């Protein structure tokens, strides 16, 4: 059975975006070593899952990007979760063939986990990621903690139905101050 891995960048004070969805702060502490860690995570994925807002935000960027992460972002199959009945995938290469999942989130994720292949990698956005966390669907958290305090924003672990015990699997420090923390539910 495939695992669902949630990869998110996070501020030191626990926010995954600013109050209005800002995320450019993650670029200030990006270095070659932390980018290589993200690239390794991407290359291990058998499928990307994301919410429809995140899909719309990143599809046009990655389809034309020269960033080293563009190849796996474009090549790995995608599943877009949406409640919109008329959602149409982007026409960009690698993104146009995205599968649309509009059923119950837990049921759809369980179906994906039962399929053969490498792990499932979730990128967000915030609301989609929170739903995965709240439903207990995440098998591994790969959190890139950036050396910045935002003071306010949108936390990943909001509105949990109960405390979430996690086991620290690994920690990797990067030159620009980012710390990758990998956790699994305990």
Image (spheres, rainbow, N blue to C red):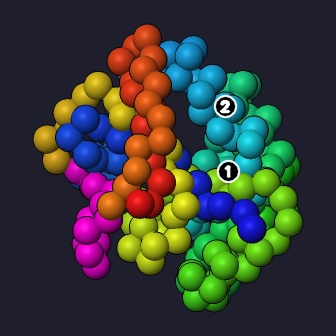
Residue placed under numbered mark 2 in the picture = 39
Tell me what residue is drawn at x 59 percent, y 77 percent: 82
Q: Position of residue 163 (x, y in %)?
A: 25, 68
Secondary structure beneath label 1: helix
User: Which residue has dot 1 on it?
Assistant: 59
The quadrant of the image that shows the C terminus is bottom left
Give the quadrant of residue 151. top left
Please say whether residue 32 is one of the residues in the magenta stretch. no
Specify whether 177 is left or right of 50: left
Q: Residue at x 43, y 11 (%)?
A: 175
For residue 18, which numbered disc appears in the image? none
Q: Is residue 102 above or below residue 34?
A: below
Residue 9 occupies which quadrant of the picture?
top left
Instruction: In the displayed orientation, state which residue is furthest to the left.
Output: 151
Which secondary structure dominates the residues rendered in magenta? loop
Q: Is residue 41 above or below residue 85?
A: above
The residue at the point 45 percent across, 17 percent down is 174
Q: Give, as a single range, the part of the protein colored magenta.
A: 153-164
Question: Which residue is at the far top?
Answer: 175
Q: Does 173 sit above or below residue 1?
A: above
Residue 95 visible in this rendered orientation of the protein: no
Q: Is residue 113 left or right of residue 81?
A: right
Q: Is residue 33 visible?
A: yes
Q: In which quarter of the image is residue 35?
A: top right
């Amino acid at each position: 059975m495939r695992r669902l891995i949630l990869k998110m960048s996070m501020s030191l004070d626990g926010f995954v975006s600013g109050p209005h969805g800002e995320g450019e702060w993650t670029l200030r502490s990006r270095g070659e070593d932390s980018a290589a860690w993200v690239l390794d995570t991407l290359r291990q994925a058998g499928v990307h899952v994301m919410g429809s807002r995140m899909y719309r935000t990143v599809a046009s960027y990655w389809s034309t990007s020269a960033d080293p992460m563009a190849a796996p972002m474009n090549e790995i199959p995608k599943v877009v979760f949406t409640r919109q009945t008329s959602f149409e995938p982007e026409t960009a290469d690698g993104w146009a063939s995205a599968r649309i999942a509009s059923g119950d989130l837990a049921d759809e994720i369980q179906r994906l986990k039962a399929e053969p292949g490498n792990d499932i990698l979730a990128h967000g956005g915030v609301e989609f990621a929170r739903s995965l966390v709240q439903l207990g669907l995440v098998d591994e958290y790969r959190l890139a903690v950036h050396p910045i305090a935002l003071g306010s924003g949108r936390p990943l672990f909001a509105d949990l139905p109960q405390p979430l015990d996690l086991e620290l699997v690994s920690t990797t420090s990067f030159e620009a101050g980012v710390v990758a923390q990998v956790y699994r539910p305990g």
